[in-house]
Image: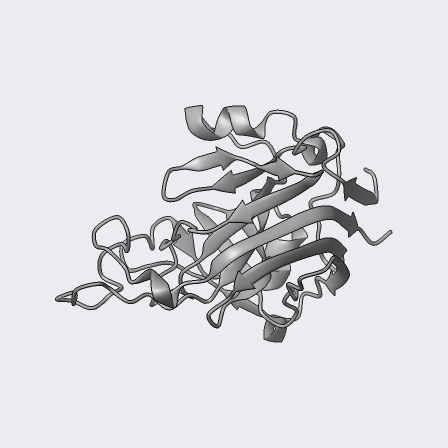
Amino acid sequence: MRARYRETFEDGPGGWIAWSGPGQPAPAVIEDGALVSRSPWGIDSNHAPPGGGYLHLLFILHTAPQPNPGPRYGPLMAGNRFIAGGYPRDFRNARISARLKGDVDLKGAELRLHCQSQMGDKAINFVLTSQPFVVTPDWSEQTIALVPDPAQWLCLGARHDLMNVYGWDEIDNVLRDVNIDIILLLHPLEIVPVTPEAHGPHHRRPEVDYAVDRTYLPSGHIMLDEIRIEFPA
């Protein structure tokens, strides 16, 4: 296994993909040699309360071949240089450096790293809440450390009707084998229905079952020029 992954997007997305909404993976957009993600962003409600909250998924990289990627994800995963390069899936104490910039109104959200692993019959999702990336108007390089310290992470769990799909576990177990993906995403989001929901905003799916007031959601764009992952020896 190689101990240092580096992607500059000079030869395409390298397996990185975007996401437009539930069931809508999308090709990554490259401009001036960098990935770019623009609002309006889709709302991932798989982890709505009692889970850890709603997400905007910006930049996604699968870290292992998926058994049934389906006709939508399969073609987008082609050319994944992380998987083809045989990089480790043990992310404990790995360091991730990203060169990025943007013009974005975050509305209280942060640009955070997400890790997802299949453990038994459930997918376990964590976001690194203690080390967000800061989006600045000019290019900046920032580094985060994936320490398996529970105090630094939030387990996203599952919404009320997906507890058979997603679940809760320990961050050390997830980082030990990140066998689904890593994502740069915006979290947390404030979801406000355009009209009142009889059972509150978390019972049904925003943007799928009811319209949301987007003035409460982040807007703008974020660009990712380079990302590196340093794995411990």
Question: Residue 72 sits in which quadrant?
Answer: top left
Q: Residue furthest right?
A: 233
Does residue 29 appear to the left or right of 208 in the view shown?
Answer: right
Frontmost residue, 136 versus 203: 136
Does residue 105 appear to the left or right of 63 in the view shown?
Answer: left
Frontmost residue, 110 versus 123: 110
Q: Residue furthest left?
A: 198
Q: Relative to 105, is 115 above or below?
A: above
Q: Relative to 118, is 93 above or below?
A: below
Question: Residue 8 sits in which quadrant?
Answer: top right
Image point 44% across, 57% down: which residue? Answer: 55
Q: Relative to 29, is 213 above or below?
A: below
Image point 62% across, 48% down: which residue? Answer: 178
Q: Residue furthest bottom?
A: 151
Image point 41% across, 53% down: which residue? Answer: 166
Q: Please state the total of marks drawn on the protein image.
A: 0
Instruction: Residue 159 in the image: state x and y as whole percent.
Output: 33, 59
Instruction: Residue 209 in the image: state x and y as whole percent.
Output: 21, 51
Image point 83% across, 44% down: which residue? Answer: 3
Residue 136 seen: yes
Instruction: Residue 168 in the image: state x and y as whole percent.
Output: 46, 61
Frontmost residue, 213 versus 198: 213
Which quadrant is home to the N terminus? top right
Residue 127 seen: no
Instruction: Residue 210 in the image: state x and y as whole percent.
Output: 21, 54
- Colour scheme used in the picture? one colour
